[in-house]
Amino acid sequence: MLSEFDLIAQYFTRPPRANGQVALGVGDDCALLTPTAGMQLAISSDMLVSGRHFFADVDPYTLGHKSLAVNLSDLAAMGARPLGFTLALALPEARAEWLAPFAKGLLALADLHHCELIGGDTTKGPLNICITIFGETAPGQALRRDAAKIGDDIWVSGTLGDARLALAGYRLNACKNDPDEPLGGQINLDASNHALAAARMHQPTPRVALGLALRGIAHAAIDISDGLIGDLGHILQRSGVGAKLSVDDLPLGAVLAQQPQTIQRHFALAGGDDYELCFTAAAAQREAVLTAAQNASTKVTRIGSIVADPGIAFVAADGTALDLQLSSFDHFRTT
Ligand code: ADP
Ligand code: MG
């Protein structure tokens, strides 16, 4: 069994990278980070708990990826550039077969975004992964939730719902009549499609480049972790506005697109774990949004508009109102 210090040295300590903003990394009482002069720090924490956010036996490589991806996604939603992160890890036991791939998945994504692991804490306990991430943004340029304006277009990046479909697949494999999947009887998912959807669930793509490209163009933004309507709802509430959503324009995940319409709508609107960006921008900025998305090599789709009436009104392609009964994922629901 590795000691705490051997474990940190072996898996979570690397020579400092060349970006120059990490003045001191792992190994002292604190890390030292040098933000660019005049920039604001953007800081966010996310905790992943075994049995709640992931299955205990999930592939440790993808778990390492996802642990950082959800934090990078928060920086993306703010339009902030990643600098570094800390990792607080509770582990039931120090097993190389788990630690090596976990660190590999984590650090591969860190390298992709030039985001350094600068410190953390390690303790024995039920598996729990808490990352705090640090980024920077120019004052006044952050994409805040309270900045949506009436008349704005509503956009979403990538596609929605495949992660939620993968979760349904796991639940239905374990129990055909899982009460958490009341629409399960309508789902048709063979093993290869389930694997495709599961890749979206386990290895989300944080839209960092898009968030950066939207600075000065978008008004409000949020990343979709708990389902589009719930997360868009946060923008609406904080901005004191409402939304009209064109349900037939939602960009569906490739696997979800093969499901019946009820499943498509529910999972795209109220799924979870998508880690796409939902953002608003003035209608006059349509071309600028599309150019920013192209520069970030990320697909974006216009799905509705911000209106004065509170709440979310759903409309079909022909403009008729749709009455959809949906609720987004809620960590404290009782089921
Ligand atoms: P302290 O006693 O000051 O809390 P620790 O002994 O917990 O310090 O950690 C020693 C060093 O290793 C510190 O620089 C800390 O930031 C770093 N560290 C601890 N755990 C991790 C981890 N899981 N990942 C990265 N760095 C870590
Ligand atoms: Mg410590």
Image (cartoon, rainbow, N blue to C red):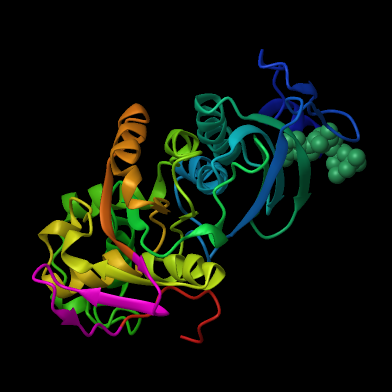
- Magenta stretch: residue 324 in it? yes
Closer to the camera in the image, 60 or 184? 184
Q: Residue furthest top?
A: 18
Residue reaching furthest to the front? 284
Q: Which residues are magenta?
A: 306-325
Q: Is 145 on the left or on the right of 256, as rendered?
A: right
Please state the horizontal and vertical placement of residue 78, each as a whole percent of the image: 56, 46
Ligand 1 found in image quarter? top right
Residue at the (50%, 83%) spot, across then down: 333
Q: Is residue 162 magenta?
A: no
Q: Is residue 121 above or below residue 187?
A: above
Q: Give the residue at x 34% y 57%.
A: 154
Picture coordinates of residue 129 (x, y %)? 64, 51
**Percent x, y of residue 81:** 59, 33
Q: Residue at x 45, y 52 (%)?
A: 58
- Rendering quarter of residue 300: top left
Can residue 129 be seen here? The reply is no
* Residue 77 screen position, x and y as percent: 51, 48
- The answer to which image quadrant residue 243 occupies is bottom left
